[in-house]
Image (tube, rainbow, N blue to C red):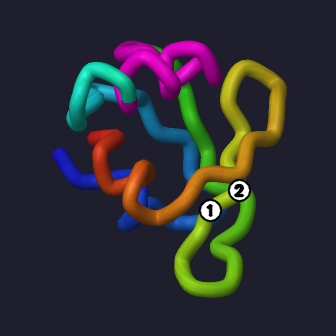
């Protein structure tokens, strides 16, 4: 298990665990980040922010939040 921040670009991964406080988990769930869902990093942006593809949508997340998503 590793954080989403360590995923290779264009590699399909499955979300295994989501950490963080209740508010962070709820926010990620609202964006579609739930355990068992496939996620793919599309781009690693300036200062480590990520653009990911989840459920056929592209979402930008910051590095701190991405570190709470385990694949």
Give the residues in magenta: 24-36
- Residue 50 badge: 1
The quadrant of the rendering that contains the N terminus is top left
**What's the magenta bit mostly, secondary-structure-wise?**
helix
Measured as percent of width and height from the top left, residue 30 is found at 59, 15
Q: Quadrant of the C terminus?
A: top left
Residue 60 percent location from the top left of the image: 71, 51
Q: In the image, what residue occupies the spot 72% across and 67% down?
A: 43
Picture coordinates of residue 31, whole percent (x, y): 63, 23
Residue shown at 72%/20% (left/top)? 55
Name the residue rendered at 27%, 20% in the picture.
Answer: 22
Q: Quadrant of residue 69?
A: top left
Label 2–label 1 contact, CB within 8 A: yes
Q: Within the magenta stretch, is there residue 68?
A: no
Residue 44 is left or right of residue 14, and the answer is right
Q: Residue shown at 46%/64% (left/top)?
A: 63
Q: Is residue 65 left or right of residue 17?
A: right
Element type where label 1 sits in the image: strand
Mark 2, other Cα within 10 Å: few <14 / some 14–19 / many ≥20: some
Horizontal relation, residue 35 to residue 13: left or right:
left
- Compared with residue 56, is residue 6 higher up or lower down, i.e. above or below? below
Q: Which residue is mark 2?
A: 51
Residue 69, relative to residue 50: is it above or below?
above
């Amino acid at each position: 298990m590793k954080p989403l921040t360590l995923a290779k670009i264009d590699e399909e991964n499955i979300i295994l665990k989501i950490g963080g406080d209740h508010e962070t988990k709820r926010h990620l769930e609202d964006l579609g980040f739930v355990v068992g869902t496939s996620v793919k990093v599309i781009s690693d942006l300036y200062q480590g922010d990520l653009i990911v593809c989840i459920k056929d949508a592209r979402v930008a997340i910051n590095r701190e939040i991405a570190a709470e998503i385990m694949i």
